[in-house]
Image (cartoon, rainbow, N blue to C red):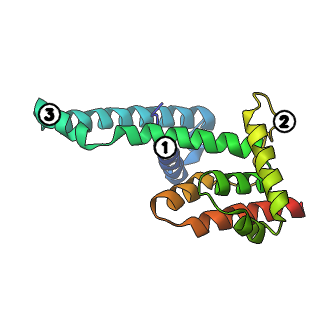
Amino acid sequence: MVGSWEDAEDIVQDTFTKWLTLDQQKIQNTKAYLVKSVTHNCINHLNAFKKRNIRYLSTFKAGELIEKYKELDFAKFDLESEVAAALAMIHKKLEPLEKGIYLLREIFNVDYEDLQELFGKKKENCRQLFCRAKEKLKQETSKSKTEVSQPFRLLEHFRNACTLGHLSDFMHQLVQEARQDIHQ
């Protein structure tokens, strides 16, 4: 109803906290009471949000509002969305070792000698894994993993490697994931 997961969680938590302070003996149908309370709290939240936005927008003149939006870099949102989708596809189609070698070689141009040292594989094996990863990514249909075994934080590490120069954190994440996959 509210369009935000965080706001919805807050509303449910507030409703539940209020419910705990009430005399529950007087409530005949707990489920109906909680549903109705959450619904009313969502409506109140949306009305308050609408009033805040109207008040905020009314303080700007049309030209100022356009300049404010020009300051925001909306193209960045599209790029981040595309990068997230690409990384998710790579994560689904490639095994952790292939993913690590592919991303470090393709994006950051890491030498095969360094990949050999990082992953403990021979240079020839790293080349083969890189080529195999490229082929897998070209395929339309693949036997991809349907579940992610651990929380997917690859985008955060990738972003930090690109923008802040924290390539070592990104490398560490990829190597750790490959090692965990080998031990499973």
Residue 43 in sight here: yes
Q: Quadrant of residue 43?
A: top left
Residue 58 position, x and y percent, is 14, 33
Viewer-nearest residue: 111 or 158: 111
Indicate the secondary structure of the residue bearing disc 1. helix
Viewer-nearest residue: 128 or 90: 128
Disc with the residue nearer the chain's start (1 vs 3)? 3
Residue denoted by label 1: 80
Q: Quadrant of residue 46?
A: top left
Give me the disc on residue 143: 2
Residue 95 position, x and y percent, is 80, 50
Q: Is residue 45 left or right of residue 140?
A: left
Disc with the residue nearer the chain's start (2 vs 1)? 1
Calculate the distance from the C-alpha at mark 1 to the C-alpha at mark 3: 31 Å
Residue 17 position, x and y percent, is 51, 52
Calculate the distance from the C-alpha at mark 3 to the C-alpha at mark 2: 53 Å
Indicate the secondary structure of the residue bearing disc 3. helix
Residue denoted by label 3: 58
